[in-house]
Amino acid sequence: MITKIAPAVVVLGQNSVPVARQIISILPGATLYGLAGRTSGVDVSFTNFGDTLRELFAEGTPLIGICAAGILIRTIAPMLSDKKQEPPVLAVAEDGSAVVPLLGGLNGVNDLARRIAEALDVKPAITTTGDIRFRTALLSPPPGYHLANPDDAKKFISDLLAGAQVKLEGTAPWLSNSQLPIDPNGNLTIQVTERLVTSAPNRLVYHPATIAIAISDIVNIALIQQLLADAELASASVAGIFAPITLAVNPAIKAIANALKVPVRFFTSNQLENLTTQGYSPAQAIAINATGSSPLSSSSSHLEIAIAPTPIDPSTIGQAQGQLAIIGTGPGSPEWMSPEVKEILKSATDLVGYKTYINLIGSLADGKQLHESDNREEIARATMALDLAAEGRYVAVVSSGDPGIYAMAAAVFEVCDRYPKPEWESIDIHVAPGISAMQAAAAAIGAPLGHDFCAISLSDILKPWSIIEQRIARAAEADFAIAFYNPVSKERTWQLAAAQNILLQYRTPDTPVVLAKNLGRTGQMVKVIKLDQLTPDSADMRTVLLVGSSQTRTIQHSDGRISVYTPRRYTEQKI
Ligand code: SAH
């Protein structure tokens, strides 16, 4: 076949060189041809575009022109005579946005277009209907069908394109309603079955996802495989594992599902009650609920297999294990959000949180159910999140900074501990950490938390001021650097001055204080003052304060910048 010759990538200007190089990187041996005077750094320089192209075409060189399709067509047109002989010719847009196969349909132009388009991350503009129709239909069957012998498909498709007829055994609307040349006497066969059958080059086998495996208790995966083998069923036809919700937290159920590469779905006892009260075993009830069919005979009371008349979409049956992720977005900017948190935000179905924090997520919140609430109703919010997760949803409770630091994680665990509900037992609860305001503040100014430190919230909404007062005194006495959260709010204005007075009993007035406001958000402000300069209007509810220990030092740089750090080495304070 002609296409054994390595392709020529042809460019008319320097702007096209980057795309050309990108294409060449996936086509070993390809040569870059560039118009002399307009391009540099190419493999071959040419002066006459038309002659060069026609020469290459005549030799059977596959041509990839980074130019308008029309230029290629006009240039090659006089040469077109034998479609069996013509090499692939493709036009690619200079910005890599379009890949258009033009000629050489019988010599792999569409495959070449697919490879190039994949490298450029675009869809190839394939227009040969026979190829699209059969290829996508047969090689990528719709969800719910698995092709058992893809290696046979290529030959099978070329036979079809050459005019062969195909016999359909079994039912699959996507095949019977397709444009395939179906004929009961065809010499090609497509078989749709959940049974284990022998495939062959002239017989494509599709396994429909019709089998439900119902388990009412953990069973050995080998037992499942044995049962499938005894019934001569293909494991590729298994649509899912179905189980009671009480098994959701058992890691063995996930291992079974992973081994069979299928999802696992759960039923509550309420959903099974109707059948179990009629005398069905829990496993039988699950099998019937999942498929609408009676189970096959089984050897274990905890394991049943049933086959549905049409493919099962597990996402529509029962429920998933509920997931509750309590996530910290970091202080604000996206680069301070952990990759784990971003992953969770992609998968979550529901977001629960204070509006400001949900806004921090930006477009990652798109398409999710939002449950915004008042910042103060932590217990109500945690309860709502758990209830949603118990229904099988994937709920992300959103906090700023770290979710375990003055934020929602503790509230969720408190609700689980003090007001437990049985249906919450099946939820997968996970905390995903974030960068806390004190870390972001410290990083912005140097290393003020470089030695022992503690964090104190000045909010007396959830704890009495007497405790806060005591804690500040002890922390100051113990010479911790101290991060103060929630320093001031509209209703709480005097606490900061009170804290300052306590601190001044243990620290010198020139102790460095870092004021960090709106970290990672618009209006970020970080400044360093001395302890005695602190006033209530130095801070607001979006400010975190870092008060140095006796060892904390300030460096004044020659360009005016200031750094603050607390050395890790300790020199005894001279009093
Ligand atoms: N979970 C958060 C803290 C929530 S408490 C965390 O780990 O950062 C709310 C307090 O945190 C605010 O009053 C303020 O003191 C501090 N804070 C939160 N985000 C901040 C930011 N972007 N800049 C400065 N301080 C912030």
Image (cartoon, helix red, strand yellow):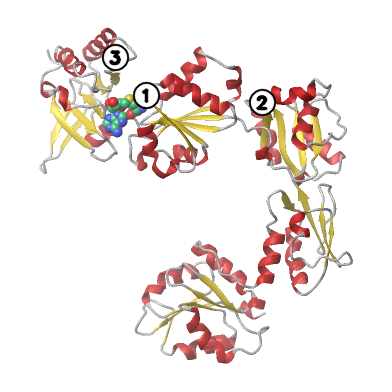
Q: Is residue 67 above or below residue 282?
A: below
Q: Of the residues shown, which amino acid type is indicated by label 2? A: Ile
Residue at image position (22%, 16%) is 479
User: Relative to 235, does residue 276 appear above or below in the rendering?
Assistant: above
Question: Residue 321 at x, y = what percent?
Answer: 61, 30
Looking at marks 3 and 2 on the same chain, the residue that comes earlier in the sequence is marked by 2
Could you tell me which secondary element the residue under label 3 belongs to?
A: loop
Q: Which quadrant, please, contains the C terminus?
A: top left
Q: Which residue is mark 1?
A: 405
Q: Is residue 564 visible?
A: yes
Q: Which quarter of the image is occupied by the N terminus? A: bottom right
Where does label 3 land, which residue? 460
In this picture, residue 88 sits left or right of residue 177: left
Relative horizontal placement of residue 487, taking residue 169 as reference (left or right): left
Q: CA distance from mark 1 to mark 2?
A: 32 Å
Left or right of residue 534: residue 541: right
Q: Is residue 503 above or below residue 434?
A: above
Please state the horizontal and vertical placement of residue 131, each as a whole percent of the image: 67, 69
Q: Position of residue 10 (x, y in %)?
A: 47, 79
Q: Is residue 446 above or below residue 410?
A: below
The image quarter containing residue 164 is: bottom right
| Residue depicted at 11% across the width and 21% down the height | 532
The mark that comes first in sequence, 1 or 3, is 1
Query: Does mark 1 have its CB less than 8 Å from ligand 1?
Result: yes
Q: Is residue 398 visible?
A: no
Query: Distance of mark 1 from mark 3, alpha carbons?
Result: 16 Å
